[in-house]
Image (cartoon, rainbow, N blue to C red):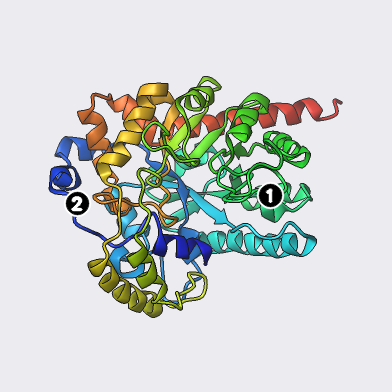
Amino acid sequence: MARLLTLLLGSAALLATAAPSSLAWAADAPVSKQDRVLHERVLTLDTHLDTPEHFAREGWSITDRHVVTQDGTQVDLPRMNEGGLDGGFFVIYTGQGALTAEGYRGARDFALNRAAEIREMVAAHPDKFELAYTADDAERINKTGKKFVFQSIENSWPMGEDLTLMQTFYATGVRLAGPVHFLNNQFADSSTDPKGKIWHGFSPLGLRWLAEANRLGIVIDVSHASDDVVDQAVALSKVPVIASHTGAKAIYDHPRNLDDGRLKKIADAGGVICINSVYLKNTAASPERLAAMKALAPFPDSETATEAQIVAFNKKRAEVDARFPPVRATFEEFMASLLHTLKVVGPQHVGIGADWDGGGGVVGFEDVADLPKVTARLKAAGYTDADVAAIWGGNVLRVVRQVQDYAAKEAAKAKPSG
């Protein structure tokens, strides 16, 4: 519910609004046949798909085509096909709650249920989706024409103080995990907690969390983490780390974005920064818009609302948007963050994690059907076909391999001889 309220009131209104005329060419520029062929040829993945929030929604199916302005969703099979998205990391997201035994139990049960929903979606469509556990799996599944589904954890709060739960989530298929979300928790400091730092990086338990992720072969995700956590993760992890949905602070100075020094630090350690389509400019709503949106309450809960309720609410929201248009970033601002990061760290250390269904989407880049625009702009900026392939999937899969190879070697060392 908190995530839905953020979408409705704040930085990433999903209803389309007209782009300024000076930027209209960027939003509407056609993708050439040559660029489309390249886009279809390379393996494309997104490292942060929040779409599992909709899997249990009554009347909603990932195999149906949806319209973002009607139901707020940005990922489904028809639009994945249209946008050439081959797969990605489907997120087990849990909004931060109490750091208590009761809070941990509730979060654990919620997260495990979300993991089950992801697996059930795949099981319901075995001819269209398949779970991926390794980089080789992703490549193999892609060759069959199906979509590959990795699982990731956004916010490890559900693990409580029992790190054996990381093994449990690993067994469900989790291969990428971040310690924290918008607020500090038992593992680490967040980049956005209004109370400030409590651990100045990882907590003692968080350091054990990091070591356990390395041991199991789970990629560490530093998005949402404080700068101290980023520094410590890079320094202490035995393998490269990923920022699954992050932007360049040089483009927009926001705590969720990374400065050039930390972009370089992640890259120098072999990691990858996957660029987000959020936190690209100041998109704070006007007092009038905030008041009008609050007057629409009760807001539909994305966990329990029916498709009809969501569509009806969005019709009302469209009226508010017409009266008090939301401030939105544009595709050019997304590309500015991507191109800046590429300039700082090079094409071998950049990926895409636009935060679809979790707040992402900008004018001219509304859902996954728009992904070929990125390929066209990368080619226009002078990047090679090999660079494009690395950015769209190769870099992330390289890190997945490195992380899993390290875990396998360490497990072999620990295995008793004879």
Is residue 264 shown above or below 79? above
Occupied quadrant, residue 201: top right
Give percent across and percent down for residue 118. Answer: 54, 59
Instruction: Quote the CA–CA distance across marks 1 and 2.
Output: 39 Å
Q: Residue at x 74, y 51 (%)?
A: 165
Specify whether 76 is left or right of 114: left
Q: Is residue 33 at all visible to an observer of this figure?
A: yes
Q: Are marks 1 and 2 in contact (CB under 8 Å)?
A: no
Tell me the crowding category of disc 1: few under 14, some 14 to 19, or many 20 or more residues within 10 angstroms, Cα based.
many
**Secondary structure found at label 1:** loop
Is residue 311 shown above or below 149? below
Q: Which residue does the numbered mark 2 point to in the structure image?
A: 19
Give percent across and percent down for residue 415. Answer: 81, 30
Tell me the amino acid under the disc marked 1.
Asn
Mark 1 or 2 closer to N-term?
A: 2
**Quadrant including the C terminus:** top right
Q: Is residue 40 at all visible to an observer of this figure?
A: no
Tag count:
2
Tell me the amino acid under the disc marked 2.
Ala
Is residue 276 shown above or below 418? below
Give percent across and percent down for residue 140. Answer: 46, 41
Q: Which residue does the numbered mark 1 point to in the structure image?
A: 185
Specify whether 228 is left or right of 85: right
| Front position in the image: 41 or 21 | 21
| Front position in the image: 163 or 292 | 292
Q: Residue at x 30, y 34 (%)?
A: 336
Q: Residue at x 48, y 69 (%)?
A: 302
